Image (spheres, rainbow, N blue to C red):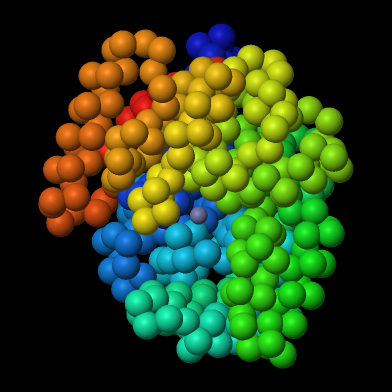
Amino acid sequence: MPISWWTMAMATKRAELHLYLFGASSGESIVIQLPDRSWAVIDCFATSSKDVRTNPAHDLLKSRGVRELAFLCLTHPHADHFTGMSRLVRDFQIRKFWGFGGLQPPDFDLLKSFFQADAATSSNRLDADAREGAAEISELFDGILSQVPSTQAVSAKTLIYPESVDKRSSVRIWGLAPSGRHTDEYKRCLVKSFARKRFKSALPGADHNLISSALLIQFGRTRIILGGDVENEGWQHVLDDKPVDDLSAHAVKVSHHGSKNGFCLGLWDRFSAGSKPVAILTPFASKALPQREALDHIQARASSIHSAAVLRHDESSFPTAPDPSFTRIRAMLAAKARARLSGSGRKGGACHLIFDNRGHFTLEHEGEAGRIA
Ligand SMILES: [Zn+2]
């Protein structure tokens, strides 16, 4: 039977890229379904590493009958991005693991020791969290070493997908960060922290965000930037080193939960150089993120801002609303947040974006997700 226009239209219609951004005010998971129907995951959080029912990425993949991931990426070793990831390694076949800057298998033992030592030296209040984090990262790295055939570190200019340059692939995913300089500095400080016995506080900026990966997804003419937890210094390197010439995007996953350190001046002007992108974020309640200052900056350079979960802190952190209709939305979200805080559920919500290859997309909110500006 000859291929009809209808068949071709259906084939074209099927060329979609799905992006699910999950959050529950305590972490971030991004699940991607590529146009060839394969799946990939970038970061993972569960409100409990022991209870798989609190892991929305795992839940989605299981509900879709997924058995294999084209890749699994950990942007940086913070618990709000890796809790529950070991369960993905256990329950799905992972073709390739993409770690953050400098993370190659020989470094896994160093990082495991770092987390164990950090847990042993942290203050009482954080002991339980730190111990759970150290146990989870050990299980994750052990699982990757025993079950994942291929691992590599993301850095600026790395081609993450497809596995090798394939002209037929309609999707390319590139690393934008971290820079080689930041990776080297981080590794030097990681090794030194054992001599000083100060661990996290011995890292540059006392943080793993220095080596957070950021990614650019190109699907035909569609461009999506996933900012990880890259902070201002990291973004300044992206602007200076130019891993790609064009940083314009149709959608941007806001970096570092919408903190005022999650961008540098000029960055969002580059993101919005073509047209204003949609901005999506995951809040982080215990650090009162997002921050109003960042949301106001982004709002001026984005078509709209969406959150995967209810903002669980002071309503004053919402952006200044030029449109009176947002007063109503703000009040509604604040009421939802209060109800949520008094309830026991911690499922959060999801922003689900469906892209074609020409920069068009639809956005759906699930659970607690909503537009905040
Ligand atoms: Zn984070």
Foreground of the two, 106 or 292: 292
- Residue at 46% from the left image edge and 21% from the top image edge: 304
Foreground of the two, 193 or 187: 193
**Measured from the top left, where is residue 298 in percent x and y?**
55, 27
Q: Is residue 175 left or right of residue 132?
A: right
- Residue at 37% from the left image edge and 83% from the top image edge: 124
Residue 102 in view: no
- Rendering quarter of residue 77: bottom right
- Residue at 30% from the left image edge and 45% from the top image edge: 313
Q: How many labels does the image show?
A: 0
**Measured from the top left, where is residue 319 in percent x and y?**
42, 27
**Which quadrant: the N terminus?**
top right
Foreground of the two, 367 or 204: 204
Q: Is residue 112 left or right of residue 246?
A: left
- Residue at 29% from the left image edge and 60% from the top image edge: 54
Q: In this view, does 77 lie to the left or right of 306?
A: right
- Rendering quarter of residue 204: bottom right
**Measured from the top left, where is residue 169 in percent x and y?**
72, 36
**Which quadrant: the C terminus?**
top left
Residue 254 in view: yes
**Measured from the top left, where is residue 106 in percent x and y?**
73, 81
Q: In this view, does 352 lie to the left or right of 163?
A: left
Decide: is 19 above or below 150.
above
Foreground of the two, 293 or 92: 293
